[in-house]
Amino acid sequence: MAFALGTAVFLPPFATHGLNATGALSATGLSKGLLMASFPLAALLGYVFAGPLSDRHGRGRVLSIGILGFAFSHLLLMLCRPLGQALDLSDSAAFLMLRLMAGVFGGMIFVVANALAGDVFPARRRARAMSIVWLGIPAALVVGVPLTSYLDRWHNQRSAGFQYWVSEPYAPLALVVSLVSLFLVRRMGGAFHAAASRATDIPERASTKPVWIGAPVISFLMPFAVLQLLATVADHVKGEFHWSELTIGHLFLVLGLSGVAGGVLSGVYADACGKLRFLLVAQILFAAMLWILPWATPMQFWLVSGLLSLFSAMRQGPFQALALSATGRSARGAFSSVVLGAGAIGTAAGQIAGSALFDTDPGFKAIAWSSAGATLLAALLSAAVLKEPGVTLACPSVPEGERAQEKSVT
């Protein structure tokens, strides 16, 4: 079940990495940041509607609608050029319109898959489950960026007619992955329902009001810090180290693999060590690496960048598990929409701020300082408002029946 949800979470970043590269490379500076930010801003609309809707009408149904809409968006993106001509739009305007449409459905996928994971997996194993589900994000980075370079070269060698009808070579692949994800989610529908009905909500300590305020702020700050770097790292290494496109592709591959490793580590250790403790350590280590990055030599840059990606991915599973523990199943979709909506705003703001700061005199140094400040503020808020669920982590007296239930859910 975690794999099926992880495949759904994989879809939006997989598509957006590829479309960022194909659609945004011709833009520069702030205009590039705005184009890249269009997807997460559109996703915000999907979060707002789909989360509460899934509380009332069922998560499986809303998730399926989101994936179907996402697949249809990429079918239209594949036909972007003829569709733009039929509507009397420029290629860039048609691309942006369809990218916004894909962003809305991508937001629906994200928020419902996140809430469904909170429903299905018991609290004492939730950090491990959420880490597996959120592995889709670094996995998309591993696949998306290098694959774009290959597809672009292949696309440029095709005939003019082929290039006209397959305007974006990445779109057909995103369409196929969407259909695979839909198949997995529909196939697991009965298992999701059964597991959610067996799972018991663990009551949160005392008042959860601070979490309802603090968790969205933390969710904003974490991607704001990361996306400032991701939006500008390629331009930085081109200018500072004169790296080629191939070398930059290898860098993104390292970032993705490090992120996958961070998600795996989080899944193995976060529940056992304590979700909040694990989250705080990862946040502090991430901030520490940011003070080194701008002054790194080329060899050091590989190492520090990989560690940053590792520590960034280590944060997601514990944070999502702690945030979801603040509310019961009946309002989990609405709360997920608030938390992930704040994250989408942070993603867009980070891309715009990073692109704008890169054009200033301090350049990449200013981006690193801004990211470090946002990360330390997120750590302070995490310590202040997030609480461990009221469960015992190491529990040798758990009945065998409950232990078998947890294994079947995971």
Image (cartoon, rainbow, N blue to C red):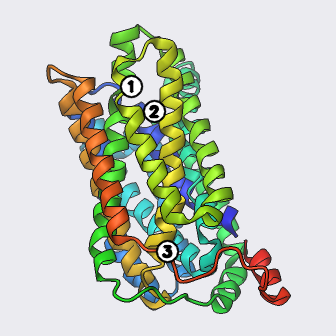
* Numbered circle sitting on residue 293: 1
Q: Nearer the viewer, residue 263 or 68?
A: 263
The nearer-to-camera label among 2 and 3 is: 3
User: Helix, strand or loop at disc 2?
Assistant: helix
Q: Residues within 10 Å of mark 2 (few under 14, many from 20)?
A: some
Residue 123 percent location from the top left of the image: 59, 78
Residue 96 percent location from the top left of the image: 30, 45
User: Helix, strand or loop at disc 3?
Assistant: loop
Which amino acid, mark 2? Tyr
Which amino acid, mark 3? Glu
Q: Which residue is mark 3?
A: 388
Q: Quadrant of residue 402?
A: bottom right
Q: Is residue 178 left or right of residue 15?
A: right
- The span from disc 2 to disc 1 (Cα, nearest Å) is 42 Å
Q: Quadrant of the C terminus?
A: bottom right
Q: Pick whichever of labels 2 and 3 is earlier in the sequence.
A: 2
Q: Is residue 13 left or right of residue 82?
A: right
Q: Which residue is mark 2?
A: 164
- The span from disc 2 to disc 3 (Cα, nearest Å) is 54 Å
